[in-house]
Image (cartoon, coloured by chain):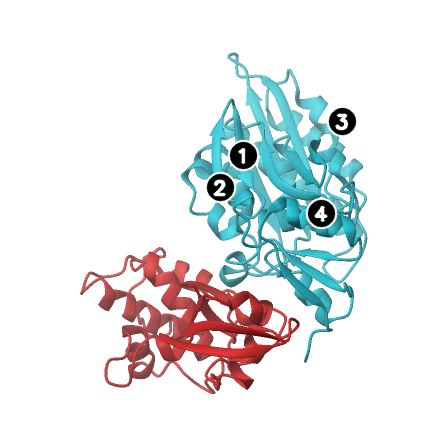
């Protein structure tokens, strides 16, 4: 067992962990961060995505000991109920969540992508969530919500569309 | 589901890591972990100790000079995509990095890990083979550089000794006309059915001065169909010559039939995709 200390959503936390415990397991079972979802546990589905020092990764493929001294941000750290992130607002307003299990990972992934490319196109959004599986296959509204949030992030500047289609076009298959 | 038990050491220097690995041949280096931790979970590998090389400054950085591009083994696939040096000098590697797994995996997976794993279809290995990359191995008693073509032995097998870690990859070709094509069963997160990289150096008269073709997922390891390459040297890249080279490349392929495709299909795709890459070079 070894003691680790990390910053979780801005708070300093400590945990005693075994070397073979994953970051996902310790977040959910020791640190009560059950907003991080467990899906495939082999890096295929993106449900467990978190930011590790600002970089979006699958927490099932990181060891808890590797987070020692680092900052972990979960979906809970992206905004607050009073001041949600534009992505969170857009997901609510556009009904982008169905069963919801993929949404924490989707939001973390999109947050990281939009942080460097707020002008992302529909195609870039789709590529960014290539490793985030929605078992409801509800990608259409997820992509729409991401683009709506991207527009808000660039303050009203319309997001350019690689495929030339307007956003939220009826019948768009996302 | 739990991982099997192991000891964990976070290495603080490359020498410490290589010494530990040399003293414990059953130990495994851990970089991005996107392959290793999955293998551990599925009990395909059960090393007693993992030596984490993810923090080593010796494995960082991308730089160019003396006609070569040096890429640290610890550079992630995502970092390759944000480097202007990679974009301008080795666009075939950038294209392969873009087709590599998905955004979340690219943020963890490293160049060195992809090379060291020696998968027959390793995405980054195929363009690196077409660009005559060298592998700099660091061991407890020093360094040696091995051509990538000699580094790869077979599936998951390389010439690296226990304790030898890839420190950097040196790409000695750049510019020219580079092309890459990966055929997968889907657009994101796909494992290659066939992958092709080509590098063509034209001479002043517009003929081919030098040529490289590398093929992935159609043999025990990525390889170069040398007859096909030789057939291009001195020639004009016209459709007839391209077709002949593509036939020679297809003839050199030794694919297997698996869940991703049949051997006959893979051979046909080698012919089609080599022709496509060379056609792109002809049109450049």
- In red, which chain? A
As drawn, is B123 to the left or to the right of A147? right
Q: Residue at x 32, y 67 (%)?
A: A147
| Residue B114 image offset from top left, x and y in percent | 64, 50
Q: Which residue is mark 3?
A: B227
Earlier in the chain: of badge 2 and badge 4, it is: 4
How far apart marks 1 and 2 lie (CA) works out to: 8 Å
* Labels 1 & 2 near each other (Cβ < 8 A): yes
Q: Quadrant of the N terminus of chain B?
A: bottom right
CB atoms of marks 4 and 1 within 8 Å: no
The disc label shown at residue B70, or none: 1
- The local secondary structure at tag 3 comes to helix
Tell me the mark number nearer the camera, choosing from 1 and 3: 1
Q: Nearer the viewer, mark 3 or mark 2?
A: 2
Q: Is residue A38 left or right of residue B251?
A: left
Foreground pick, B251 / B90: B90
Q: Nearer the viewer, mark 4 or mark 3?
A: 4
Q: Are marks 3 and 2 on the same chain?
A: yes
| Earlier-in-chain disc, 1 versus 2 | 2
In percent of width and height, residue A62 lies at 57, 67
Answer few, some or many: residues within 10 Å of disc 2's Cα (few below 14, many 20 plus, some between 14 and 19). Answer: some
Q: Tell me: A114 left or right of B96.
A: left
Q: Quadrant of residue B93?
A: top right
The image's mark for residue B61 is: 2
């Amino acid at each position: 067992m070894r003691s680790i200390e990390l910053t979780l959503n801005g708070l300093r936390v400590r945990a005693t962990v075994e070397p073979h415990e994953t970051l996902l397991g310790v977040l959910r079972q020791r640190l009560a961060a059950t907003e991080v979802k467990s899906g495939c546990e082999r890096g295929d589905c993106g449900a467990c995505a978190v930011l590790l020092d600002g970089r979006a990764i699958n927490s099932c493929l990181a060891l808890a000991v590797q987070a020692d001294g680092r900052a972990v941000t979960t979906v809970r750290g992206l905004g607050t109920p009073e001041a949600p992130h534009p992505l969170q607002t857009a997901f609510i307003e556009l009904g982008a969540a169905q069963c919801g299990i993929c949404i924490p990972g989707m939001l973390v992934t999109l947050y990281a992508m939009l942080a460097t490319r707020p002008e992302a196109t529909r195609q870039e959004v789709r590529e960014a969530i290539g490793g985030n599986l929605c078992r409801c296959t509800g990608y259409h509204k997820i992509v729409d919500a991401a683009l709506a949030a991207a527009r808000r992030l660039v303050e009203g500047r319309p997001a350019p569309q690689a495929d030339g289609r307007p956003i939220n076009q009826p019948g768009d298959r996302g | 589901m739990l991982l099997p038990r192991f000891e964990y050491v976070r290495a603080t220097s490359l020498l410490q890591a290589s010494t530990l690995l040399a003293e414990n041949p059953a130990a495994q280096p851990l970089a991005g972990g996107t392959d290793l931790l999955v293998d551990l979970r599925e009990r395909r590998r059960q090393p007693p100790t993992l030596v984490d090389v993810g923090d080593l400054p010796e494995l960082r950085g991308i730089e160019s000079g003396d006609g070569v591009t040096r890429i640290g083994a610890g550079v992630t696939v995502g970092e390759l995509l944000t480097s202007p040096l990679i974009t301008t000098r080795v666009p075939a590697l950038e294209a392969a990095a873009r087709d590599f797994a998905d955004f979340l995996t690219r943020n963890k997976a490293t160049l060195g890990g992809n090379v060291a794993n020696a998968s027959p279809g390793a995405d980054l290995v195929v363009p690196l083979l077409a660009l005559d990359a060298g592998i700099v191995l660091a061991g407890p008693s020093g360094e040696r550089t091995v051509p990538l073509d000699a580094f790869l032995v077979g599936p998951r097998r390389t010439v690296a000794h226990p304790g030898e870690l890839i420190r950097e990859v040196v790409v000695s070709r750049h510019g020219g006309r580079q092309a890459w094509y990966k055929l997968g069963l889907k657009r994101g997160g796909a494992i290659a059915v066939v992958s092709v990289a080509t590098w063509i150096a034209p001479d002043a008269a517009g003929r081919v001065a030098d040529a490289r073709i590398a093929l992935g997922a159609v043999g025990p390891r990525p390889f170069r169909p040398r007859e096909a390459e030789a057939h291009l040297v001195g020639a004009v890249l016209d459709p007839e010559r391209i077709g002949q080279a593509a036939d020679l490349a297809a003839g050199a392929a030794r694919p297997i039939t698996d869940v991703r495709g049949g051997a006959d299909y893979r051979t046909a795709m080698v012919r089609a995709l080599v022709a496509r890459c060379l056609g792109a070079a002809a049109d450049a």
